[in-house]
Amino acid sequence: MKISHTAKGYFLAFVSVIAVSNVYIFSKAALKEVSLPQFGVYWFAFGLLWIVLYKLFRGSFAHLRKLSVRQYGILVFLGIIEVLSTYFFFKAIYTISNPAIVSFIGNISPALIITLSFFVLKETFNKLEFLGMLLALFGAFIISYKGGSLDQVFIDGAQYIVYSGLFGAINAVIIKIHIQKIPPQIFTLSRTTFLLIFSIIALWYMGLDLKISISAFKNIFVGSILGPFLTVIAGYLALQYIPLSRKAIIGSTRGVFVLIGAYLYFGNFPGTITLIGGFISIIGVLLIGIGKLKK
């Protein structure tokens, strides 16, 4: 039975969701024991190894020689944007105690991506989708809000998720524009290489060494397969078959998987307010999906 391109896109997007959900868990476990630069060097070194092995298996290194100077420039620009987005993402994981909270607040990312897609890619959305976007943002606000003085309105770490989402939206839209001419494996290789270089520079600048515990090493090893490799490869491949906004919508369901994983792995369950905000954001995502179906 022949599988349609759309079905392939949804399947790959779902694989990416499952993989990235586990990234929250394994990265949080590792970051409890190591610094961000140490984590980054091991995480992205392993990630680069898996990508190189994958490319050798597929024989796709020939694509590098076919890229134009302009396309290499795009990869450099995306590498810088990706460093900023990924740094703030793991900074949020490091700062916020429960990775499920990071995931729930991260539901603002689809709203940012869809908004940017509307202006740049001309991908339209209807009133139901717009309502869903508002609910996703409102849910994230409920989770983040803690009251107090103006400079302490939101929980510490929420700002990093916003920064990561903004840079991630820019990155996703640029990739969508060029995904047909630059293979997904090249984007993945470039991304991981830039992140590894940045981590090595940070490690050297902070005067840290590479000595870490066995348990942290195990968590990084497993997480690197799911994160820098499987999540990114599956996510980029999905963009070849489905619109960016739909991939973003599917990606928003990761909060449920992270919630379950955080409870099973850490015995850590969010409070009532966090759960209410999280499920409001998920309802928002569902409304966006229903709006897509109506179109």
Image (cartoon, rainbow, N blue to C red):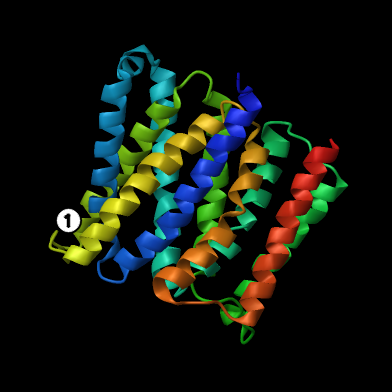
| Outermost front residue | 1
Q: Position of residue 259 (x, y in %)?
A: 54, 66
Residue at 36%, 44% in the rendered image: 228
Residue 24, located in which quarter of the rendered image? Answer: bottom left
Taking the image as drawn, is residue 133 in sight? no
Q: Secondary structure at mark 1?
A: helix
Q: Is residue 36 left or right of residue 7?
A: left
Q: Position of residue 162 (x, y in %)?
A: 56, 59
Q: Position of residue 127 (x, y in %)?
A: 87, 47
Q: Is residue 48 left or right of residue 284?
A: left
Taking the image as drawn, is residue 48 in sight? yes
Residue at 37%, 40% in the rendered image: 229
Q: Is residue 247 above or below residue 167?
A: above
Q: Is residue 153 above or below residue 202?
A: below
Residue 23, located in which quarter of the rendered image? Answer: bottom left
Q: Is residue 187 above or below residue 38?
A: above
Q: Position of residue 118 (x, y in %)?
A: 73, 38
Q: Quadrant of the C terminus?
A: top right
Residue at 17%, 56% in the rendered image: 204
Question: Dot 1, how many residues are within 10 Å of its Cα: few (below 14), some (14-19), or many (20+)?
Answer: few
Residue at 38%, 47% in the rendered image: 226
| Outermost bottom residue | 148
- Which residue in the structure is indicated by mark 1? 204
Q: Quadrant of the N terminus?
A: top right
Q: Three-letter amino acid code at disc 1?
A: Trp
Labels in figure, total: 1
Q: Is residue 179 left or right of residue 283?
A: left
